[in-house]
Image (spheres, rainbow, N blue to C red):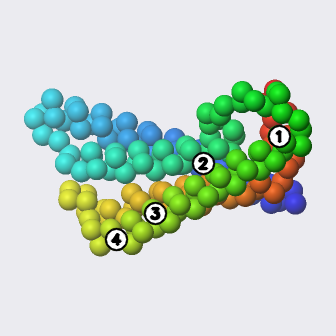
Amino acid sequence: MEFLRKLVDWFWEGLNVLMTAAMLLMIALVFVNVVLRYGFNSGILSTAEVSRLLFVWVTFCGSIICLRQRDHLELRLIENILPPTVLIILRRFIWLLIFVCCMMLIWGAWNQVGMNYYNKLPLSRIPVAVLYLAGVVGGIFMGLIAVHRFFVISADRVEEEETK
């Protein structure tokens, strides 16, 4: 069990490293392109497309991490007035709703991947499907987190205690 926990921790650290690398690459691409355009009246044509692609992936990876760490925006106005059993039922309903939304995201993004598999971005020649694949990957991992939180009641309590 300890090995599995370390493997999961390595995955989350790897995802953070990949997001950081993508952000640094985006910054470097845009900076170099701006310097080339204003300083030398030229530029790298595909930097805007690659930056947009990286931005989409960083956004979805960030949303996965935010959901895992409970850093997303949530409204807790009625939690203090609800009895504990109703609160548990409400939280399970919310995680079920999040899971359904993730399934819709996966379904829609997968359809877009299929439709845009042979379409290429005009300058970088990267398949457009790579943009939509971020939605599939994000939906899968957020859906797994939602399923875990739905079935493991203690997951909500443990993470709440860690944040206090």
Answer few, some or many: residues within 10 Å of disc 2's Cα (few below 14, many 20 plus, some between 14 and 19). Answer: many
Q: Is residue 107 above or below residue 74?
A: below
Badge 3 element: helix
Tags 4 and 1 in contact by the CB under 8 Å rule?
no
Residue 81 place in picture, x, y as percent: 83, 28
Looking at the rendered structure, the kind of residue marked 2 is: Ile
* Residue under pointer 2: 64
Looking at the rendered structure, the kind of residue marked 1 is: Leu
From the viewer's side, name the closer residue of 112 and 29: 112
Badge 1 element: helix
* Residue under pointer 3: 108
Earlier-in-chain disc, 2 versus 4? 2
Report whether 30 appears left or right of 160. Answer: left
Answer few, some or many: residues within 10 Å of disc 4's Cα (few below 14, many 20 plus, some between 14 and 19). Answer: few
Badge 2 element: helix
Looking at the rendered structure, the kind of residue marked 3 is: Gly
Residue 88 place in picture, x, y as percent: 84, 45
Report whether 12 appears left or right of 123. Answer: right
Q: CA distance from mark 3 to mark 4?
A: 11 Å
Q: CA distance from mark 2 to mark 1?
A: 24 Å
* Residue under pointer 4: 115
Q: Quadrant of the C terminus?
A: top right
Earlier-in-chain disc, 3 versus 2? 2
Answer few, some or many: residues within 10 Å of disc 1's Cα (few below 14, many 20 plus, some between 14 and 19). Answer: some
* Residue at 87% in and 60% down: 1
Mark 3 vs mark 4, foreground winner is: 3
* Residue at 29% in and 73% down: 118
Q: Is residue 50 above or below residue 29?
A: below
Q: CA distance from mark 4 to mark 1?
A: 42 Å
